[in-house]
Amino acid sequence: MSPLSSDSVKCSADADRWNRLGVRRALRDEWSTARDCFERAVAGGGDVIEFWINLGVASMHLGDEDTGRGAFELADTLARRPRTAGRAPCLENLFAVPLRGVVNE
């Protein structure tokens, strides 16, 4: 589950569609289907932080804390990487799925 190789996958339109479908499923509390969609999104857009966050949220909702934490750690690592000169983000203004009751305060 690592997009951090030197051949990092660039985001595809399919990855964006999978992410959006996952968000719709998550908003309906269909977390298993949502996670499947987010897994497909990260497979096609491995350097898009929001996809990894959404995968982490869905995994946490399903009680898979190891996968959730791993996805959040990858999102954090991606967020700390300097952008390659001249490279624009793949997608802008994505909304990550809310945790809604998963995080204990």
Image (spheres, rainbow, N blue to C red):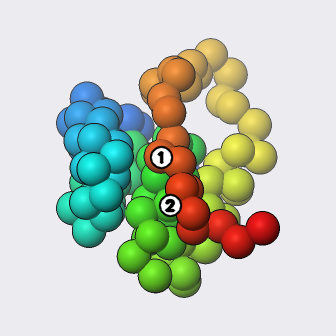
Q: Secondary structure at mark 1?
A: loop
Q: Is residue 55 above or below residue 16?
A: below
Q: Secondary structure at mark 2?
A: helix
* Quadrant assignment for the C terminus: bottom right
- Spatial separation of the CA atoms under disc 2 and disc 1: 7 Å
Residue 75 seen in render: yes
Residue 15 seen in render: no
Classify residue 105 as left or right of residue 33: right
Identify residue for label 1: 97
Disc 1 crowd rating (10 Å Cα; few below 14, some 14-19, many 20+) is many
**Amino acid residing under circle 2:** Val
* Quadrant assignment for the N terminus: bottom left
**Amino acid residing under circle 1:** Val
Q: Are marks 2 and 1 in contact (CB under 8 Å)?
A: yes
Q: Quadrant of residue 39?
A: bottom left
Q: Residue 54, percent across and down?
A: 46, 52
At x 47% / y 46%, what residue is drawn? 97
At x 33% / y 52%, what residue is drawn? 26
Identify residue for label 2: 57
Q: Residue 14, percent across and down?
A: 21, 36
Q: Residue 60, percent across and down?
A: 50, 72
Residue situated in front as seen by the camera: 23 or 75: 23
